[in-house]
Amino acid sequence: MINQATFTSIDFESAGTSAGGTDTPVQIATATWSPPPHINQATTTLADTWMSYIHTNKKITWSAQQVHGITKQHLLNAPKLMLLWPEIKKRLNNNIIVAHGHGTEKKFLKAFPAHGFGPWVDTLHLARAAYPDLTDYSLGPLCQTLKLEQEISTLASKAHTTTASITWHHALFDSIASIILLKHIINTFSLHNQPLTLLTKPNTTAWRKNRTSH
């Protein structure tokens, strides 16, 4: 059941791809949350948040820097992805994994063959099922449309350990945003006592029935 699950969202930011090249991650973050016993509980409590930059030998493309603002300076002394395995396993193992458009996250986690993480909840698929009339399902505009940005910003400020503020396309900010979006959908459609498969394998017919009652 959904109200018995622990969800951990994950987000990667990447170096970007140049002609003929392959992409590599430069930042990773996670956020862990469990649904509270009471629906629409006012305060969101994250059990854990974590972020790390990731070493890469590849050049960060100009276009990627324009999106997330990460430069080589941020990666000085950053660990290689393989060295982050203990931290990643500690946070993802045995939890329900959440991502918004999980293709990138699954791709980079292939660095750890047979890691066994899952099942996955893709908040992009959920949002399309829950809100079929929207025109933009990218994470930032979607959360802004649903008026979730203030809550996300507040939690991100508490979780970020430096004085610098963070926003969209920072892995920690986006991982928290995915969790808040998931929480919003669970609350809005009263899914606490529903089977987890309603999130992991969105069924259009089931979601349509939920929408007719809201």
Image (cartoon, rainbow, N blue to C red):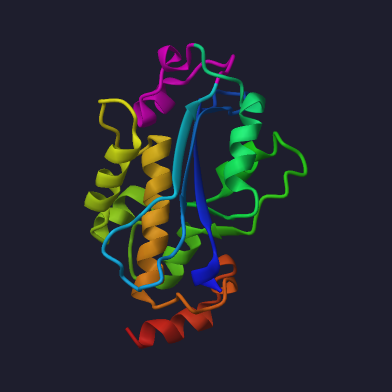
Q: Position of residue 112 (x, y in %)?
A: 72, 36
Q: Position of residue 188 (x, y in %)?
A: 34, 73
Left or right: residue 197 versus residue 162 is right
Q: Position of residue 83 (x, y in %)?
A: 64, 24
- Residue 131 visible to an observer of this rendering: no
Front residue of this view, candidates 101 and 33? 33
- Does residue 1 lie above or below 34 as drawn? below
Q: Residue at x 26, y 64 (%)?
A: 42
Write down the region rendered in magenta.
55-76
Q: Residue at x 73, y 44 (%)?
A: 115
Front residue of this view, candidates 166 and 169? 166
Q: How many marks?
A: 0
Whether 67 is among the magenta residues is yes
Q: Residue at x 52, y 51 (%)?
A: 8
Q: Which quarter of the image is occupied by the C terminus?
A: bottom left
- Does residue 118 lie above or below 68 as drawn? below
Left or right: residue 22 versus residue 158 is right
- Does residue 205 lie above or below 97 as drawn? below
- Residue 12 visible to an observer of this rendering: yes
